[in-house]
Image: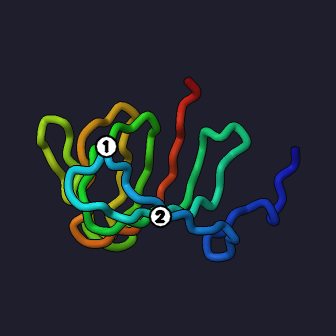
């Protein structure tokens, strides 16, 4: 298969639609934040995805089965592991959350990030 310039996905030219959702009740710790994704690309195996994620203020439990690279574009969040250790994330931060991470994600100021996810085949 040959890949051409027309196959390259430019976020600013993408026609991907924003999908909004409420944080599932069983995961909520504080608030009921509205979240959204604009998934600009998924590969044919459905294991690799990239796009933009947004969230309103709130806090919820997370359990990562995927590896995720993140770049915070706007806002402030706090990520806590299940032992209570935490890290504040803010505009300009770049990081990877490995599969297997469990804890909490708290949005302190409305947050927007680029995500790149790899979900290993089970």
Residue 29 shows up from this direction = yes
The number of numbered discs placed on residues in the rendered structure image is 2
- Whether residue 69 sits left or right of residue 58 in the image: it is right
Q: Which mark is residue 26?
A: 1
Mark 2 highlights which residue? Answer: 36
Count neighbours of disc 1 (C-alpha within 10 A) and say few if under 14, some if 14 to 19, many if 20 or more: few
Name of the residue lying farthest toward the left: 84
Name the residue located 70 percent from the left edge and 71 percent from the top edge: 15
Q: Is residue 65 above or below residue 122?
A: below
Q: Which mark is residue 87?
A: none
Q: Position of residue 91 (x, y in %)?
A: 31, 70
On screen, residue 17 versus residue 87, left or right, reads right
Label 1 – label 2 distance at C-alpha = 18 Å
Q: Secondary structure at mark 2?
A: strand
Q: Residue at x 24, y 41 (%)?
A: 103
SS for callout 1 = helix
- Sequence-wise first label, 1 or 2: 1
Corner quadrant of residue 44: top right
The colouring scheme, among rainbow, by chain, secondary structure or one colour, is rainbow
Point 12% across, 41% down: residue:
84
Query: Quadrant of residue 11 in the image?
Result: bottom right
The quadrant the N terminus occupies is: top right
Quarter of the picture holding the C terminus:
top right
Q: Residue 58, located in which quarter of the rendered image? A: bottom left
> Which residue occupies the foreground of this view, 30 or 101?
30
Q: Which residue occupies the extreme right position in the image?
A: 1
Looking at the image, which is closer to me, 58 or 92?
A: 58
């Amino acid at each position: 298969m040959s890949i051409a310039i027309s196959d390259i996905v430019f976020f600013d030219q993408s026609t991907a639609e924003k999908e909004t959702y409420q944080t599932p009740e069983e995961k909520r710790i504080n608030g009921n934040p509205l979240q959204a994704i604009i998934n600009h690309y998924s590969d044919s195996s459905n294991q690799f995805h990239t796009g933009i994620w947004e969230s309103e203020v709130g806090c919820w439990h997370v359990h990562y089965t995927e590896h995720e690279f993140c770049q915070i574009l706007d806002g402030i969040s706090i990520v806590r592991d299940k032992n209570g250790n935490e890290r504040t994330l803010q505009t300009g931060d770049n990081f990877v959350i490995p599969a297997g991470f469990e804890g909490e994600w708290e949005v302190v100021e409305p947050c927007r990030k680029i995500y790149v996810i790899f979900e290993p085949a089970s």
